[in-house]
Image (tube, rainbow, N blue to C red):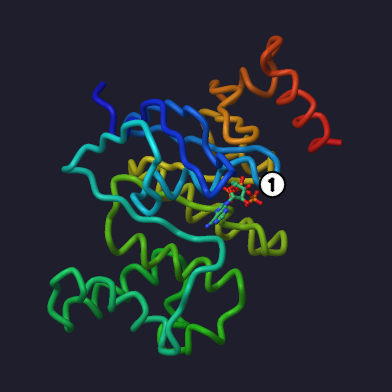
Amino acid sequence: MPALIELGNVTVRFGRVAALADVSLRIAPGERVAFIGANGSGKSTLLRVLHGLVRPASGSLLRDTAATQAMVFQRPFMLRASARFNVALGLWLRGNRWGHAKQEAVHALRRVGLEAEAGRNARQLSGGQQQRLALARAWAMRPDVLLLDEPTSSLDPHGKREVERVIADFAEAGTTLVFASHNLGQVKRLATRVVYLEHGFVLADLPVDHFFNGPLGEVSREAELFVKGELG
Ligand SMILES: Nc1ncnc2c1ncn2[C@@H]1O[C@H](COP(=O)(O)OP(=O)(O)OP(=O)(O)O)[C@@H](O)[C@H]1O
């Protein structure tokens, strides 16, 4: 199957820090890929490279130009305006008429269970609601690929469940998911493939069952320790 995104030997530097080192990665349609690893291992940087927000110092990035992408950040930025306006604006900026954009915004809000909050100031919504609002904004774009940077890191268990449900809906609708997470339970629930990063290197890239249950081999000893540590 042709790749949606393909990275070849990508290195990203911030000053003297190599945030990514020689990363090669191929993402095919329908995959659900989780990036895991310790703080500073390069997960966010990798997502930003995939979304074209960070330019590699070297290496190649190929993207299927017909495929659309959306990214949801760890702390999504909301305008001081209604939830509906926050979703509609993105659609309007992409050339939709305002009336149509507002209509589509309401559909997207319904999809994430925020219909009742459509008229509320987005900044006054709870963390979980804001995260779902960010997903509604992405949903409205009907992306082929959805990139998420620790989408539930600041949420309580209820908020986490709600946001995970929406993410799972994206996957069911055929969206390719690529997300960074520190929550290994979430990785097991949502991902089909795990990419383990350490100091900017990909140390393991395996189907989720193999990553959590199979022997990881010499090169992935650190990954094994990481998983054991995280799972306590
Ligand atoms: N804009 C930047 N300027 C300078 N250094 C940066 C920048 N962004 C990332 N880095 C550095 O690059 C490395 C990788 O950071 P990155 O945010 O990608 O890690 P991460 O795995 O997402 O971490 P976390 O789990 O804490 O979110 C770190 O050493 C970080 O300090």
Residue 22, how many percent across, how many down? 47, 27
Q: Nearer the viewer, residue 148 or 190?
A: 148
In the rendered image, residue 38, in percent from the top left (x then y), is placed at 70, 41
Along the line of sight, the residue nearer the viewer: 160 or 53: 53
Residue at (28%, 77%) from the top-left corner? 88
Q: Dividing the picture into quarters, in which one does residue 80 lie?
A: bottom left
Q: Where, quadrant-wise, is the C terminus in this rendering?
A: top right
In the rendered view, tell whether residue 214 sits above or below residue 164: above
Q: Mark 1 near ligand 1 (CB under 8 Å)?
A: yes
Q: Which quadrant of the structure image shows residue 57?
A: top left
Quadrant holding the N terminus: top left
Please report the residue visible at 61 percent of the width from the left and 57 percent of the height from the top.
Answer: 152
Residues 178 and 103: in front is: 178
Q: Which SS class for mark 1?
A: loop
Please provide percent x and percent y for residue 118. Answer: 41, 83
The crowding category of the residue bearing disc 1, from other C-alpha atoms within 10 Å (few below 14, some 14 to 19, many at least 20), is few
**Residue type at numbered disc 1:** Asn
Count of numbered marks: 1
Vertical comparison of 176 with 139: above or below: above
Whether residue 19 sits left or right of residue 51 in the image: it is: right
Instruction: Give the quarter of the image for residue 112.
Output: bottom left
Query: Residue beneath label 1, please?
Result: 39
User: Residue at the spot x=27%, y=61% of the render?
Assistant: 141
Query: Residue 205: where, in percent of width, then height?
Result: 54, 23
Q: Is residue 154 above or below residue 78?
A: above
Question: In the orientation shown, which residue stands out farthest toward the right?
Answer: 232
Measured along the vertical axis of the image, is residue 19 above or below residue 113? above
Q: What residue is shown at x 59% (from left), y 22% (from top)?
A: 204
Farthest-out residue, front: 16
